[in-house]
Amino acid sequence: MKHFERKLGSILTAVVLAVVVMGQTGKAMAQEKVASIHGHVLNSIGQIVTRGEVRLTTDRTSDAKNRKYQYTFQISSTGEYKGTGIAPANYVVLVFQDDKSLDFNDNVNIAAGEDKQVDFDMSRKEYLDKMTPEEKKALEEFKKKNAEAVAANAKIANLNSLLLQARADNKAGNFASSVTAMQQATTVKPDEPILWITLGDSQLGAADVAAKEAKAAGKPSTDPDVMQKYTDAATSYKKGIDLNAASKKPSPEIAGAAYNQLGQAYGKIGDAKNSSDAYEGAAKAQPTQAGMYYFNEAATLYNANKMDEAVAAADKAIAADPKRAEAYYIKGQSLIPKATVDKAGKIVTPPGCVEAYQTYLEIAPDGPHAEDVKGILTGIGETIKSSYKATKKK
């Protein structure tokens, strides 16, 4: 009895398996009865068509608008289309855009299980020959505009490449190379502010290198060749500033950066008046950054040995940003050379000097100049007054 039950179970299993196999075979047969289609679509100038649809029909008796289309597949942004579930037949395959028929392929046989590739290239001679005179004229105008756009895009791409390379060269200290690149860029597009400003940065860097070399050779700081390089940088910055101001949407950031660099160039020439005016321009363009620009002015003038002007700039920086410690340091450093010795041999500092040093220590007790400032105050017989304690380093 047990043997019979096992045999019956085997028979039932075989039957079930047979049913499953038959079911799968039926499914496979069903899949073989349908087909797929795919392809890409190009317009009359060989560019991809990024929108529209591809329609399939077996109706060849009606016009394009009145036909019944069995299948419709969307064209993607890459100019491609694809569709599945198509019954095998002989189709007319059409491209539509805005419900207008653009192109077609007739007598497209699609077999069961096939993935048919049907491409459309409207730049082919046969397609162009069938265009009306008006369509051909419109096509030529479009080709001309497209060529101009392609040329403009190529120019922009080249300028961007030059700009990126120049900035990389400036960062690496290859100023001669960046000057050459940006001179080329400003020749190609002389109305772009950022190109002139980057040229100014390149020229300013080259001038600094020349100044260092001149000093090593024992030449004066006013060496004509060096001064000319700084002048060239200033000229480029001014060009960029003027172009930005004349643009439809002047950029405060571009103006602030350019004025800031212009102030540095003038400072190294030794033109304190124009340097101060440039930094004033930067602060006016970006009032929220005024403290930084005035501090840069103070530092530039201090480095140019223009002490009175540096003090005035430091005061403006302090007024704009009272917590900027470095501004107090520059002020103290600019005033200390005016210290005198009285009859009793005591060092007398000019007004505001000691206070500037003390305030620096108040704000930055661990600042980079803290020890120097303490040494100066001690050296001139002043007591170091600070309500701030140095932060212990972990």
Image (cartoon, helix red, strand yellow):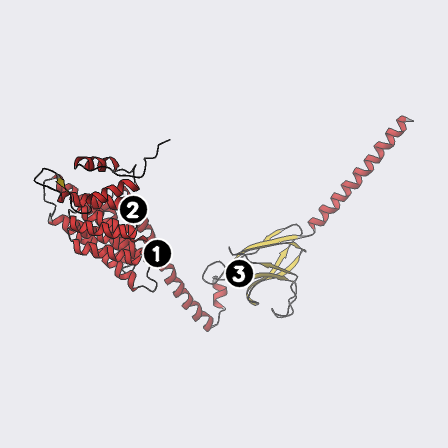
Secondary structure of the residue carrying tag 1 is helix
**Number of marks in picture:** 3
Q: Nearer the viewer, mark 1 or mark 2?
A: 2
The residue depicted at 27 percent of the width and 54 percent of the height is: 258
Kind of residue indicated by mark 3? Arg
| Disc marking residue 51 | 3
Q: Residues within 10 Å of mark 3 (few under 14, many from 20)?
A: some
Q: Position of residue 165 (x, y in %)?
A: 31, 47
Q: Which residue is mark 2?
A: 324
Q: Nearer the viewer, mark 3 or mark 1?
A: 1
Q: How far is mark 3 from mark 1, CA to CA? A: 27 Å
Q: Residues within 10 Å of mark 1 (few under 14, many from 20)?
A: some
Answer above or below: position of 317 versus 248.
above
Q: How far is mark 2 from mark 3, CA to CA? A: 58 Å
Q: Which residue is mark 1?
A: 156
Q: Which part of the image, by quadrant, shows the C terminus?
A: top left
Most distant residue in the front direction:
344
Q: How far is mark 1 from mark 2, CA to CA? A: 41 Å
Kind of residue indicated by mark 2? Arg
Answer above or below: position of 205 versus 64.
above
Q: Position of residue 281 (x, y in %)?
A: 25, 58
Residue 358, quarter of the rendered image: top left
Kind of residue indicated by mark 1? Ile
Secondary structure of the residue carrying tag 3 is loop
Most distant residue in the bottom direction:
134
